[in-house]
Image: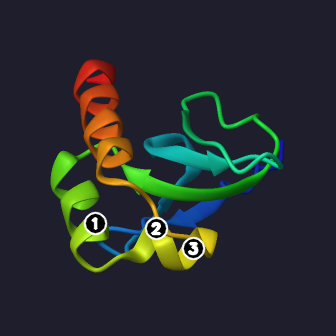
Amino acid sequence: MRKRKVPLRMCTGCGEMKPKKELVRIVKNAEGEISLDVTGKKPGRGAYICKNPDCLKKAKKQKRLEKAFGCALPDELYSRLEEELAADE
């Protein structure tokens, strides 16, 4: 039996390539709403981040999510993402 290829994605915080299932997807839909996508199935532009809150802090400091989505993100969105990542663990 053949082994299946494991899809790799880059974490926007630390920049490491990791298996897709180990990362959390942040998605921007067609209406411009940004949300956390735990399932990885929501439609829209996605960026991946580790389940580690330190990676989210690095991404915020270097404005990597703004670059990935092409728009400015409010601070309350980051605080909501931190809460959801903490609750996910």
Spot occupied by residue 35 in the image (x, y as percentages of width and height): 56, 38
Spot occupied by residue 13 in the image (x, y as percentages of width and height): 32, 68
Marks 1 and 2, the one that precedes in the sequence: 1
77 displayed left or right of 66: left
In this rendering, is residue 21 above or below 63? above
Q: Residues within 10 Å of mark 1 (few under 14, many from 20)?
A: some
Do labels 2 and 3 touch, CB within 8 Å?
Answer: yes
From the image, tell me which residue sits under label 3.
68
Q: What secondary structure is found at the residue carrying circle 1?
A: helix
Q: Residue at x 76, y 35 (%)?
A: 42
Do labels 1 and 2 touch, CB within 8 Å?
Answer: yes
Q: Nearer the viewer, residue 35 or 72?
A: 72
Q: Residue at x 35, y 76 (%)?
A: 63
How far apart, in angstroms, are the residues tagged by discs 2 and 3?
Answer: 5 Å
Instruction: Residue 60: give its label.
Output: 1
Q: Residues within 10 Å of mark 3 (few under 14, many from 20)?
A: some
Q: Residues within 10 Å of mark 2 (few under 14, many from 20)?
A: many
Name the quarter where the N terminus is drawn: top right
Spot occupied by residue 80 in the image (x, y as percentages of width and height): 33, 34
How far apart, in angstroms, are the residues tagged by discs 1 and 3?
Answer: 12 Å
From the image, tell me which residue sits under label 2.
65
63 displayed left or right of 55: right
Q: Amino acid at mark 3?
A: Ala
Spot occupied by residue 26 in the image (x, y as percentages of width and height): 54, 47
